[in-house]
Amino acid sequence: MLTLDKLQSTGKKATRDGFGAGLKAAGDKHDNVVMLTADLRGSMKSEDFINTYPDRFIQMGISEANMMGVAAGLATGGKIPLTTTFANFSTGRVYDQIRQSIAYSDKNVKICASHAGLTLGEDGATHQILEDIGMMRMLPGMTVINPCDYNQTKAAVQAIVEYHGPVYLRFGRPSWPIFIPEDQKFEIGKALQLSEGSDVSIFATGHLVWYAVEAARQLEKEGISVDLINIHTIKPLDAEAVVASARKTGAVVTCEEHNRYGGLGGAIAETLAAQHPTPQEFIGTDDTFGESGEAEELLEKYGLGVKDIVAAVKRVMKRKR
């Protein structure tokens, strides 16, 4: 098992770079992998795949709804299509097409969504979608994955290509610490334990996993033992791991770069309400849109920083029964 002392940053790369690397690796292994993009081949870091397999790349232009329909058709014909554009345009702009053409008929389409959350930064509120996990989680049969760093994103891409069924894969724009081992197995629907503790459970996803690691280090120095779990698959949620951790610690904090409604925090609250009611604090945006700014400054401003996680832990521990 991983431990806090082993979770050290080995450098920085964007999770979207991990997508590009994973796409190329998946394409090398599976000749029916096809990439579609809505005029964002460069932003998706997909040049290695495109240059190697130009006949398996489709430039759709700025026509995201059409891209989803074409992907559904390709899946019907036995291809494994990966659609690529920003998370806002991968969900909000095309929700009807995803629901009707992909989810309803259980098409083997992988919706790969970059530039998610506040860390899109300077492009501002119109592009910083903070509702996408909730939107996609509600679709019947849709798998929802939100990896935390370059290595985990690379592994996740290869895993979703092996998996049959519609998938929403969410990743981001900024350079971010690489801390998950390159050889760490990615199991869809299986939480990844990062440290074992007895005082509080921290469940984190995406970019905020690294912030949760830093918060856990600080808390350990203060004598607070943290059970830290990376929830890279939000649907299907690893309910067994969630409930086991909550039973052990009696207090829960959830951390996500997403609206606190409908995302990871909501999924865990639903699970615990049914199986083991537990005091819970939510780290996420508070029913608001974002704004333009530097990625890390925005995380701090909207209450998603390391200090906010530490404060949430101390609050929830006061509520323990």
Image (cartoon, rainbow, N blue to C red):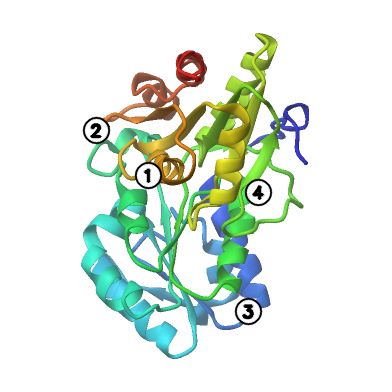
Residue drawn at the location 62% of the way across and 65% of the way down: 158
Q: Which mark, by number, is residue 30?
A: 3
Q: CA distance from mark 1 to mark 4?
A: 23 Å
Q: Position of residue 95 (x, y in %)?
A: 25, 63
Q: Which mark, by number, is residue 287?
A: 2
Disc 3 is placed on an element classified as loop
Q: Residues within 10 Å of mark 4 (few under 14, many from 20)?
A: many
Residue drawn at the location 65% of the way across and 49% of the way down: 151
Disc 2 is placed on an element classified as loop
Q: CA distance from mark 2 to mark 3?
A: 41 Å
Query: Position of 27 compared to 123: left or right?
Result: right
Q: Residues within 10 Å of mark 3 (few under 14, many from 20)?
A: some
For disc 4, the marked residue is 151
User: Is there a contact, CB below 8 Å, between mark 1 and mark 4?
Assistant: no
For disc 1, the marked residue is 263
> Which numbered disc, 2 or 3, marks the residue that appears first in the sequence?
3
At label 3, which amino acid type do we have?
His
Quadrant in the picture for residue 19: bottom right
Q: Which mark, by number, is residue 162?
A: none
Q: Residues within 10 Å of mark 1 (few under 14, many from 20)?
A: many
Quadrant in the picture for residue 289: top left
User: Is there a contact, CB below 8 Å, between mark 2 and mark 3?
Assistant: no
User: Closer to the observer: label 3 or label 1?
Assistant: 1
> Which numbered disc, 1 or 2, marks the residue that appears first in the sequence?
1
User: Closer to the observer: label 1 or label 4?
Assistant: 1
Q: Position of residue 150 (x, y in %)?
A: 61, 46
